[in-house]
Image (cartoon, helix red, strand yellow):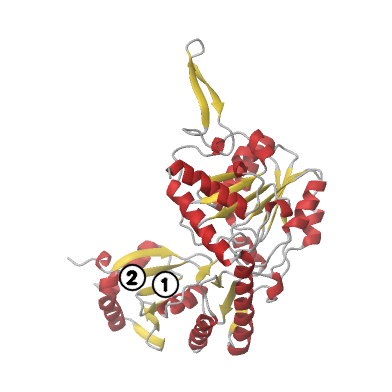
């Protein structure tokens, strides 16, 4: 099979995985960050103006804040922030009250990368559409962990990364409704994204015809290896079943929450502990120790977690924290590993 | 002439905490680096031979047997470099 055919098969696989109508609605990008930047520059830069509003929440990853702040400075539109409750859940009343006819885009994470809280993006998409706004879903933490159906959510855009779902780094996808991708201007210029570049002797310039989506947004040689690897990762996950992936993570989260609460005396879990409201992400702290101390101690015992503010500083402000330690689970984790994790936490509590 | 770089793979600033840095020692020199630091710094507390709470020249830091150390409240990378030079050389 030819490389091009494999690459386009990867696109079809991604489309089917998130139930997109057509493979042409899938743009390959480097990851979620690039996908959101693509929307910000290719759609936002051209369509947003003074008086318009874009709405995000305080639980967003920096990649769903910074591009909008940059574009807002150029175009003069207003970026608004929806509040987050103390338990890390979205304040729906506040968020929805901020959507009006001025709102042109609501951009929200499907699952928080810090708290694991699952947002009802379908509900927000409905309110956004009723007000004539578009809905962008940051699916970096949802697409790898649960069934995601872009048509059911009625998302206009959805962004996610391959490296969070058993694929390699440097590959991800942007889903965009076909009619939106067709009317958007390109993000970057170069090969592949054009049909013709004709030099006009009279004007001394080139006249350029864009290629059709999704290629219009894929300037330069594509990451063929990345696309094919992402396809294989999706096949692997589909073979397990996304409902089963979610159920496994929920089981581990519930088990870890109960055991941590029962066995650890100096440990504080941040955000909601209700497994019904979240995925397998657990932010925590240990009294008297910094998140980095905890991470390095666990690292010493062969357990990897993340420490710091996880590229979500505003949410840490909501939690009144400088940083947090974050454990996260996936299909390869077991209850036995959680038992070991808690044994080590009990050990570091003695320090 | 020995240098800090003989022992240190990288110095990374931490995010989220008060200004700090994580020092990672070179894998093949970490035992030597840890031994040198343990000789010069004052041990305040330790746990299971994994984590060591130390002070040196008025600076508190924590060292891990995996070959990493966290320095907190140190102004910049240069200040940490100077401290490491005093500890390692």
In depth, the one of A146 and B30 nearer the eye is A146
Q: Is residue A300 left or right of residue A178?
A: left
Rendered location of residue A228, percent (x, y): 47, 51
Q: What is the spatial separation of the Cα atoms under label 1 and label 2, in whole angstroms?
A: 10 Å
Rendered location of residue A239, percent (x, y): 55, 64
- Kindly identify the residue that appears in the image at 52 percent across and 36 percent down: A188
Rendering quarter of residue A18:
bottom right
Rendered location of residue A152, percent (x, y): 73, 54
In depth, the one of B85 and A229 nearer the eye is A229
Q: Residue furthest front?
A: A1
Marks 1/2 in contact by CB < 8 Å: the verdict is yes
Query: Would you place residue A27 above or below residue B31 in this image?
Result: above
Rendered location of residue A90, percent (x, y): 73, 63
Query: Would you place residue A226 above or below residue A208 in this image?
Result: below
Q: Residues within 10 Å of mark 1 (few under 14, many from 20)?
A: many
Rendering quarter of residue B58:
bottom left
- Kindly identify the residue that appears in the image at 36 percent across and 67 percent down: B80
Label ID, residue B79: none
Local SS, label 2: helix
Of all chains, the one bearing label 2 is: B
Q: Is residue A190 left or right of residue A243?
A: left
Going from N to C along the chain, the mark reached first, 1 or 2, is 1
Local SS, label 1: strand
Q: Residue furthest left?
A: B1
Q: Which residue is mark 1?
A: B71
- Is residue A310 in view? no
Do callouts 1 and 2 point to residues on the same chain? Answer: yes
In depth, the one of A273 and B44 nearer the eye is A273
- Is residue A216 in view? yes
Label ID, residue B83: 2
Q: Residues within 10 Å of mark 2 (few under 14, many from 20)?
A: some
Of all chains, the one bearing label 1 is: B
């Amino acid at each position: 099979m030819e490389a091009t055919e494999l690459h386009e098969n990867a696109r079809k696989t991604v489309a089917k995985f998130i139930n997109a109508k057509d493979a042409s609605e899938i743009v390959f990008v480097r990851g979620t960050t690039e996908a959101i930047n693509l929307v910000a520059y290719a759609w936002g830069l051209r369509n947003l103006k003074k008086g318009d509003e874009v709405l995000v929440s305080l639980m967003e990853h920096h990649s769903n804040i910074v591009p909008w702040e940059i574009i807002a400075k150029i175009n003069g539109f207003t970026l608004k922030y929806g509040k987050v409750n103390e338990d890390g859940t979205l304040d729906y009343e506040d968020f929805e009250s901020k959507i009006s006819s001025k709102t042109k885009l609501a951009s929200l994470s499907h699952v928080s990368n810090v708290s694991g809280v699952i947002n009802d993006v379908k509900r927000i998409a409905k309110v956004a559409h009723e007000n004539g706004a578009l809905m962008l879903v940051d699916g970096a933490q949802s697409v790898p962990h649960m069934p995601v159906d872009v048509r059911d959510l009625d998302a206009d855009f959805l962004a996610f990364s391959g490296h969070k779902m058993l694929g390699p780094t440097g590959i991800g996808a942007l889903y965009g409704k076909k009619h939106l991708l067709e009317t958007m201007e390109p993000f970057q210029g170069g090969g592949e994204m054009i049909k013709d570049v004709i030099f006009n002797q009279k004007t001394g310039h080139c006249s350029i015809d864009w290629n059709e989506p999704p290629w219009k947004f894929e300037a330069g040689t594509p990451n063929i290896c990345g696309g094919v690897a992402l396809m294989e990762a999706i096949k692997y996950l589909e073979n397990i079943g996304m409902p089963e992936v979610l159920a496994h993570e929920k089981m581990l989260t519930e088990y870890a929450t109960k055991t941590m609460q029962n066995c650890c005396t100096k440990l504080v879990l941040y955000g909601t502990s209700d497994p019904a409201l979240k995925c397998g992400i657990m932010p925590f702290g240990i009294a008297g120790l910094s998140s980095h101390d905890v991470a390095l101690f666990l690292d010493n015992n062969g357990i990897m977690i993340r420490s710091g503010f996880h590229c979500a500083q505003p949410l840490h402000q909501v939690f009144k924290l400088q940083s947090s330690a974050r454990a996260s689970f996936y299909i390869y984790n077991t209850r036995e590993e959680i038992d070991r994790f808690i044994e080590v936490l009990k050990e570091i509590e003695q320090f | 002439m020995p240098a800090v770089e003989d022992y240190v793979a990288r110095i990374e600033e931490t995010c989220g905490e008060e200004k700090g840095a994580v020092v990672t020692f070179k894998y093949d020199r970490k035992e030597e680096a840890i031994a040198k630091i343990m000789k010069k710094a004052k041990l305040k507390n330790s746990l299971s031979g994994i984590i060591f709470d130390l002070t040196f020249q008025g600076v508190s830091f924590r060292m891990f047997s995996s070959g990493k150390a966290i320095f907190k409240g140190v102004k910049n990378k240069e200040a940490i470099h100077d401290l490491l030079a005093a500890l390692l050389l």
